[in-house]
Image (spheres, rainbow, N blue to C red):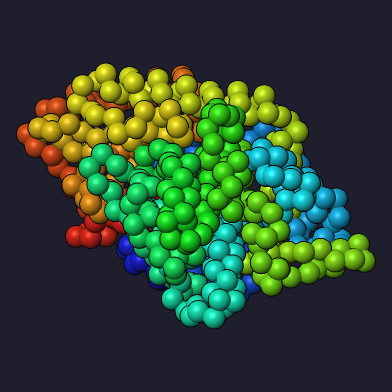
């Protein structure tokens, strides 16, 4: 919810920012919350902003985020060279536009589109925008079909599991689609095929399957969901497409699990998104949305922009957008190739699985996942320990590590877990240091008489990925991804 700066932000301090006396003969301060009357010298303005940002977290110790926090100097250089390029200006920057098209073809090939040379897709600001576009295409296709059949098209629904990322709640809310959420049950912490089909009816625009879940890094059973929907079609005639939210996994599975069928090899998969800025190894923000063929993206959603005297189709929510991320994505594709991506992602998986095993061996934890799908795992504290997952999270925070703790949604509100995301740059060495700090923390936590913190302590001031939970209200799924 948009809100003004909380008063605690400035405490009892003056709301003015004082300038370092090195720069000025007279004491100078500038207002914090309104435009200064006069400007400042560029050196002074730079120093103020730079000093303030020093207090941001150390991204390399942030095991909460999925988003890229490190790039090679050449990525940084290419991005600096293209700060001024506007992605939408295809006519002005035709080479950038061409790199975007090449990336789309490469992804179409990677995800086994029936004909990559005619695959359609686009870059976006991230997976959220890409999911909106995927959802909109499903909704429009369904509306066209219903109207053609002379049936009402005013009560669309979309079926997905309760662990979907917040962007799907936004899609349903912003575009008036009823969200039908499959709850978790027992050890099933994501979508089940039978449970998804049970919620489908003639008003279902599509089923969303996630590769993989932000709660625990597990892959949802895309092929099983498709098979169950094939069966539904045989029984009832209902033909319901699937969108795969591969924000993370669409850049992991092709390299680490090449035999896993989750993509356009499954004819029912109509569209796929990924975040270039997650395991695509680009800084935020870039995402990708692809459709299996032209029939999957209704023509009436597509606009035309000028391009080299001709026109180019676009489908997007944003208009102007930086070009550097798309350029950096193309660089990463060239730089690493299939073999390089496999090496990088496989290393993340090895670090994740070995760290998970070491944590399990400490004793007081139970793994919910082991890092063998996304290089992400979740673990909980076994019963009877004198500390909670929230205590563990707070103790690690004291050592500088950001490891979020959160409760699960319906029907596993009883389950609270910690989650670790292993990204490129989080090495076996760093994992060893984390394990040392965790072991040390356990020494102290083990001497507590009882757990100190509950779900209200899930306070990771980490942007939208892990905002502080509101006291008394259990964190909802938007709090953790
Ligand atoms: C991160 C994530 C999103 C949102 O992606 P952004 O690129 O941050 O907009 C959507 N779905 C899943 C499964 C995610 O992990």
Give the x, y percent position of residue 164. Answer: 41, 53
Quarter of the figure with residue 150: bottom right
Task: Please give the name of the residue rendered at 41% of the width and 29% of the height, measured from the top-left corner.
Answer: 371
Decide which of 286, 441 is in the foreground and name it.
Answer: 286
> Residue 69: where, in percent of width, then height?
55, 39
Q: Tell me where residue 479 appears, x and y as whole percent.
A: 36, 53
369 and 115: which is toward the camera: 115
Look at the image and tell me whether residue 401 can be seen: no
**Quadrant where the N terminus lies?**
bottom left
Q: Is residue 271 above or below residue 374?
A: below
* Residue 102, image quadrant: top right
Residue beneath the point at 55% across and 63% down = 138
**Left or right for 271, reference 162:** right
Q: Quick check: 87 above or below 190? A: below
Residue drawn at x 23%, y 60% is 473
Q: Position of residue 467 (x, y in %)?
A: 37, 54
Which residue reaches farthest front? 235
Q: Nearer the viewer, residue 114 or 249?
A: 114
Q: How many marks?
A: 0
Report whether 185 appears left or right of 221.
left
Residue shown at 34%/32% (left/top)? 369
Residue 264, visible in the rendered structure: yes
Q: As drawn, which residue projects farthest toward the right?
A: 309
- As rendered, which of 245 and 449 lies closer to the eye? 245
């Amino acid at each position: 919810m948009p809100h003004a700066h909380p008063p605690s932000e400035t405490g009892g301090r003056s709301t003015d920012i004082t300038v370092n006396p090195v720069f000025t003969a007279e004491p100078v301060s500038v207002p914090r919350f309104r435009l200064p009357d006069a400007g400042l010298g560029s050196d002074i303005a730079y120093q103020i902003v730079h000093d303030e940002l020093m207090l941001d977290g150390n991204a390399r110790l942030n095991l909460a985020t999925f988003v890229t926090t490190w790039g090679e100097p050449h990525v940084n250089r290419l991005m600096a060279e293209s700060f001024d390029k506007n992605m939408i200006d295809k006519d002005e920057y035709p080479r950038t536009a061409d790199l975007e098209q090449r990336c789309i073809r490469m992804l179409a090939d990677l995800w086994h589109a029936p004909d990559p040379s005619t695959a359609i897709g686009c870059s976006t600001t991230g997976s959220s925008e890409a999911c909106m576009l995927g959802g909109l295409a499903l909704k429009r296709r369904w509306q066209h079909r219903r109207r053609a059949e002379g049936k009402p098209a005013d009560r669309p629904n979309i079926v997905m599991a309760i662990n979907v990322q917040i962007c799907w709640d936004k899609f349903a809310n912003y575009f008036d689609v009823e969200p039908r959420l499959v709850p978790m049950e027992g050890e099933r912490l994501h979508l089940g095929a039978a449970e998804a089909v049970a919620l489908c009816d003639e008003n279902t625009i599509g089923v969303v399957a996630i590769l993989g879940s932000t709660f625990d890094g597990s892959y949802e059973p895309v092929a099983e969901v498709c098979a169950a929907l094939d069966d539904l079609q045989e029984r009832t005639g209902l033909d319901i497409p699937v969108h795969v939210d591969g924000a993370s996994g669409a850049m992991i599975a092709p390299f680490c699990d090449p035999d896993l069928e989750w993509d356009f090899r499954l004819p029912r998969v109509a569209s796929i998104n990924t975040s270039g800025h997650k395991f695509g190894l680009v800084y935020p923000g870039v995402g990708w949305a692809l459709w299996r063929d032209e029939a999957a993206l209704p023509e009436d959603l597509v606009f035309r922009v000028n391009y080299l005297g001709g026109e180019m189709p676009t489908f997007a929510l944003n208009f102007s957008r930086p070009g550097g991320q798309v350029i950096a994505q193309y660089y990463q594709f060239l730089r690493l190739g299939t073999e390089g991506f496999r090496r990088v992602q496989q290393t993340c998986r090895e670090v994740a699985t070995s760290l998970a095993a070491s944590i399990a061996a400490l004793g007081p934890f139970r793994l919910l996942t082991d890092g063998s799908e996304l290089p992400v795992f979740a673990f909980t504290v076994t019963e009877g320990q004198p500390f909670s997952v929230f205590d563990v999270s707070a103790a690690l925070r004291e050592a500088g590590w950001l490891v979020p703790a959160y409760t699960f949604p319906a029907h596993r509100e009883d389950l609270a877990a910690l989650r670790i995301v292993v990204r490129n740059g989080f090495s076996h060495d760093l994992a060893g240091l984390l394990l040392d700090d965790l072991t040390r923390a356990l020494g102290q936590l083990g001497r507590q008489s009882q757990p100190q913190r509950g779900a209200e302590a899930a306070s990771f001031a980490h942007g939208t990925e892990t905002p502080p939970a509101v006291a008394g209200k259990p964190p909802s799924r938007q709090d953790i991804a």
